[in-house]
Image (spheres, rainbow, N blue to C red):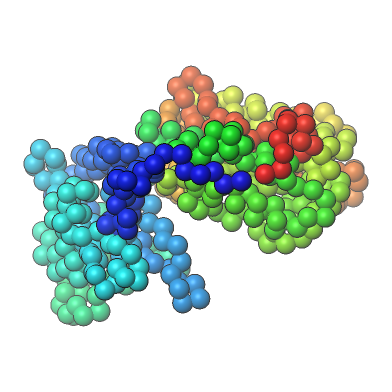
Amino acid sequence: MFPTVIRRWSTTVTKPAKFGQPVFASHPHLIKKDELTPGISAHEYEFRRQSLMKNLPDNSLVVLMGGKIKYMSNRTYKFRQASDFWYLTGFDEPDAAVILEKTSSQRGYKMSLFSSGSNPEKQKWDGARTTFEDAKTHFAFDESLPFHALPGTLRSLLPACDNIYVDILNPSSRRTSPRSILKYLSPSESRSEYDTIMEALSSARRKALAPVVANLRSIKSPAEQAVMKTAAALLPRPIHLSPSLLSNVTLLHLQTMRYTHPNMSEHAIASHFEYLCAVAGSQRPAYVPVVASGPNALIIHYTSNNQIVHQGELVLIDAGCEFNGYASDITRTFPVSGTYSPAQRDLYTAVLNAQKDLIKMCFEAAGVSLMDLHRKSAQLLTTELKQISIGFQLTQSMVERELYPHFVGHHIGIDLHESNHLDRNEVLREGMVITVEPGIYVPPSPHFPKEFHNIGIRIEDDILIGSTGPTILSVNAPKEIADVEGACQGSLGLEPF
Ligand SMILES: [Mn+2]
């Protein structure tokens, strides 16, 4: 079932790797020569930083904190870099910080990295970390210093800056607190060093960095669009896989529909999808999948995924992957038995029609915002429901109150829910990527016909906003009734994989 690797890289690759992340020399199957991270060139990272620094006033300083390792059962959990840090540097090691100083040089800034550097003893246990010297040449840092040099550097630079852009979010409270940066600093710093840093960070000169970076991140470059297309289509680069396997993994949601049968656990379905994604080259799931059978679909963020799916029920699967740093977020609702019941079919058709009409509005020239789309979604769902037997008496406010409790969609990119700093009232622009995910969830209330009780349906696609039309990135996942039923029944010619 697993393909043998087709191209022979082994004669030229460096193994074990010498960097703390994939580079061309060690991972030519993942990364091209001019790329810093898969699909994104070093040139593009430079462009991102220059775009950021150009927008900041003179005498500005940016402090970027990288992600920290998390632990579970006293072992390190698979590391994921902090999103903005990754977006601006491509440097994928934990316990790192970067200072960007705006200058009048041609580049427009000076960039210093603070990282753990290479340690031969630690390397025996954890593998390579990028050396200070390699960090400079490979990632274009002007300075590369040990992490413990960060407080001293901050102390010497901060007092003279007019603007300090930094995010010091306290994750537990989701509130910004200068004190939360202390956890990044070595406990050996002197009191006066702390005080100088704290004073600067507590002053009005401190500005939030996240909203500035969010603006840059909201418009996806052609390279980002290509990576996101792959993340949503779940189509890996062909170099991993033989052509026959490749044709099987382009449609992982379809494969998961085919795999599902009555009396199976929701857990098996979730695992199957995650397995398919991992084999296809995804680094991690983009979020804990929702695999909700029958009435469980009424719980919007159902992630227990531990009940048995029964004949006659629908399965709502909300699952996506993270691929080369970008997320996909896709929801499908399919019949376990392979055929929708009349009530399921009516409700599904209502949601599908609304979703398709909403997607048609996703382009810049349409001049709509996410908020406009949401209002339109409630209106469209109401119109659709009034045409089937659930909805003779329905009003839009009843739909919003009782049947459709969530928002129509969100920006997506490096983060599943891309930046909270983007305004839902802002008109959608070319290059943005959003989800469109209307849904209907019918509670077992006497004022709804019984045949609709406990049916929950959501259909979600990832949409690239174009200038005059939308591109559906997740187009491979079936959603027309004939296609979904065909996928479930295996009549599309696919065997369970
Ligand atoms: Mn979503």
Q: Nearer the viewer, residue 349 or 317?
A: 317
Toward the front, the furthest residue is: 11
Res. 391 image quadrant: top right
Q: Quadrant of the C terminus?
A: top right
Query: Taking the image as drawn, is residue 350 in sight?
Result: no
Query: Taking the image as drawn, is residue 141 in sight?
Result: yes
Q: Nearer the viewer, residue 256 or 224?
A: 256
Where 122 sits versus 132, above or below? Answer: below
Q: What residue is at 35 percent from the left and 71 percent from the top? A: 125
Q: Nearer the viewer, residue 427 or 33?
A: 33
Toward the top, the furthest residue is: 468
Question: Which percent across, then down, holds residue 21?
Answer: 33, 54
Res. 190 image quadrant: bottom left
Going by the image, does 458 lie left or right of 250? right
Q: What residue is at 52 percent from the left and 27 percent from the top? A: 471
Toward the left, the furthest residue is: 105
Where 322 sits versus 469, above or below? Answer: below
Question: Which percent across, then down, holds residue 336?
Answer: 80, 45
Q: What residue is at 65 percent from the left and 26 percent from the top? A: 357
Going by the image, does 18 lie left or right of 240? left
How many marks on residues? 0
Q: Nearer the viewer, residue 304 or 127?
A: 127
Going by the image, does 247 lie left or right of 211? right
Q: What residue is at 46 percent from the left and 39 percent from the top? A: 6
Question: Which percent across, then down, holds residue 341?
Answer: 87, 38
Question: Which percent across, then down, holds residue 377?
Answer: 65, 34
